[in-house]
Image (cartoon, grey):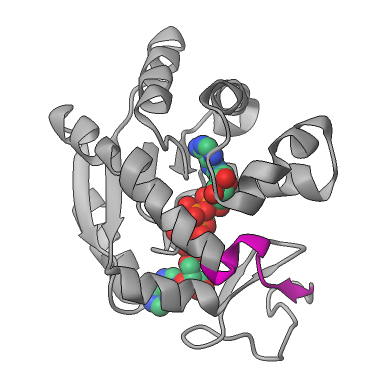
Amino acid sequence: MRLILIGPPGVGKGTQAKKIARKHDIPQISTGDILRDAVANQTSLGKEVQGYLDRGELVPDSLMLDLIEDTITSDRCDNGFILDGFPRTIPQAEGLDRLLRKYDMELNDVVVLEVDENIIIDRLSSRRSCTNCGHIYNLKTNPPEHSGICDQCGGELIQRDDDKPATIKNRLEVYREQTKPLVNYYDQQGLLIRVDGTGSIRDVYERIRDVLDL
Ligand code: AP5
Ligand code: MG
């Protein structure tokens, strides 16, 4: 199974991708998580991309395509993958199409999650993530049992640096200008499925499960 999840910041891509990945035993490839790990470990990639993440801008396409080529051809993607946060521009989508042809792979579906911007701002302002296992919480809708501590692994919960109001605003603009055109791109390829991202995490998961026939 090879899936792509697209949608604006905070729509629930990571939350839903983790659920699908766990249930169907395929890896969730979150380019945001990979880049944040690189920044946290101050690798050469991390040093190169830190400024882009801090400003809520996109990392250059060529860098992202190299990273994705390495990832989708690694052993862990032998049974497929869910891409969460990639592609994000038309050149990235065209580059991915070239890679899929090169390695004789096919996409099954592209799911776009949709919610109103006011819900997004609310969700992002109260998000917390585990520094150890990456589990995603929300102080309002999906809080941890003990404040600041991950229910799954006991790790420390933090607020992402790019969840400040000014950066959220910029990320939403970047989405509208650079990523939203992908909806048409995949619609024209007959791969697009629109899913309403409102309601509870379970409601959204059930909608995705139903449309993908999982
Ligand atoms: P990335 O990490 O991909 O961020 P994003 O697209 O802005 O999306 P988020 O991770 O913020 O939101 P999400 O949709 O995963 O929502 P979540 O499930 O956490 O990218 C970060 C940065 O990396 C970019 O700005 C860019 O600089 C760089 N980058 C990454 N990929 C790139 C690429 N391909 N090219 C170039 N640059 C790239 O949910 C949000 C909150 O809502 C949580 O608190 C959650 O608990 C809650 N929630 C989720 N679902 C529900 C629900 N149904 N009801 C109530 N609450 C919910
Ligand atoms: Mg995410």
Which residue lies at the image location 42% right of the left edge and 47% below the top edge?
Answer: 174
| Residue 164 shown in magenta | yes
Count of numbered tags: 0
Q: Residue furthest front?
A: 166
Q: Is residue 23 visible?
A: no
User: Is 44 rendered above or below residue 149?
Assistant: above
Residue 60, picture quadrant: top right
Which residue lies at the image location 82% right of the left edge and 31% below the top edge?
Answer: 44
Q: Residue furthest right?
A: 42
Q: Position of residue 201 (x, y in %)?
A: 38, 74
Q: Position of residue 203 (x, y in %)?
A: 29, 74
Quadrant for the N terminus in the image: top left
Q: Position of residue 179 (x, y in %)?
A: 35, 41
**101 horizontally vs 66: left or right:** left
Q: Position of residue 32 (x, y in %)?
A: 59, 47
**24 horizontally vs 184: left or right:** right
**83 horizontally vs 202: left or right:** right
User: Is 206 rendered above or below residue 97?
Assistant: below
Q: Nearer the viewer, residue 123 or 190?
A: 123
Which residue lies at the image location 28% right of the left edge and 50% below the top edge?
Answer: 112
The magenta span reads: 156-165
Which residue lies at the image location 75% right of the left edge and 32% below the top edge?
Answer: 45
User: Is 13 rendered above or below residue 187?
Assistant: below
